[in-house]
Amino acid sequence: MNSGQATVYVVDDEVQIRNAIGSLCEETGHLVKLFASTDEFLAEGLSGGPSCLVLDVRFPGTSPTGLELQRRLVETGVLIPIVFISGYSDVRVSVEAMKRGAVEFLPKPFREQEILDAIRHGIERDRRRMAREDAVRDARQRVETLTSREREIMMLMAEGLVAKQIAARLGVSEVTAKVHRARMMRKLELRSPIEVVRLIDSMGREAEAPRAGAG
């Protein structure tokens, strides 16, 4: 999925600009979906692959503005990278957009290479995000296979404790601690304490709470 064809969503009420950006993106091998308003975009929904949203700042009528759409997406956990375009020079708006994570804020008229570079950066950012999410998902699935005792040893190992210290903390023999540690490392497909720390950090420390399981 992460290495597949990317989708570029273009939301602009100016048909010429909308079509021009769409044509550029198609020429570079991207899927393109065009919308005349933020309402149309919200009604469409997103694809599951890497993507980037090219979004105008202002829209006529009652459609949400570009900033309002960005705010709504952030609040609902939709992390699509956004490239803002605008025919108005507004420092406050551009600063607000960038603070919320926009990839770029381009004033109209912009050069073709400028918009293509911004879209490329957005898609690369989305691919990295999806790769991180895949890694976290894989880590959680592997941790789910651990027993409660193995999870305890994983966390103590991440604190820097060696087998003798782990055994003393858990009230078991050093041999027993080593057996559980070896099983834990094999299930997680890890080879060193550093890798254990990295795995736990990638999960946001969610593995700290031991779950019920065989000891």
Image: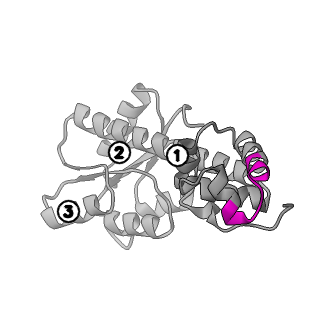
Q: How many marks?
A: 3
Left or right of residue 90, residue 179 in this image:
right
Mark linked to residue 20: none
Quadrant housing the N terminus = top right
Q: Is residue 171 magenta?
A: yes
Q: Is residue 78 magenta?
A: no
Residues packed near mark 2 inside 10 Å, few (<14), some (14 to 19) or many (20 plus): many
- Measured from the top left, where is residue 162 in percent x and y? 60, 50
Quadrant housing the C terminus = bottom right
Q: CA distance from mark 1 to mark 3?
A: 27 Å
Question: Which residue does the numbered mark 2 point to in the structure image?
Answer: 18
Mark linked to residue 132: 1
Q: Nearer the viewer, mark 1 or mark 3?
A: 1
What residue lies at 53% left-to-right and 60% top-to-bottom?
204
Residue 45 in sight from this viewpoint? no
Q: Could you tell me what secondary structure mostly forms the magenta stretch?
A: helix
Query: Which element carries disc 3, helix, strand or loop?
Result: helix
Q: Earlier in the sequence, mark 3 or mark 2?
A: 2
Q: CA distance from mark 2 to mark 1?
A: 32 Å
Above or below, 95 relative to 157: below
Question: Which residue does the numbered mark 3 point to in the structure image?
Answer: 95
**Of residues 58 and 142, which is closer to you in this image?**
142
Q: Nearer the viewer, mark 3 or mark 2?
A: 3
Residues shaded magenta: 168-178
Residue 79 in sight from this viewpoint? yes
- Measured from the top left, where is residue 141 in percent x and y? 72, 50
**Of residues 98 and 28, which is closer to you in this image?**
98
- Measured from the top left, where is residue 167 in percent x and y? 70, 58
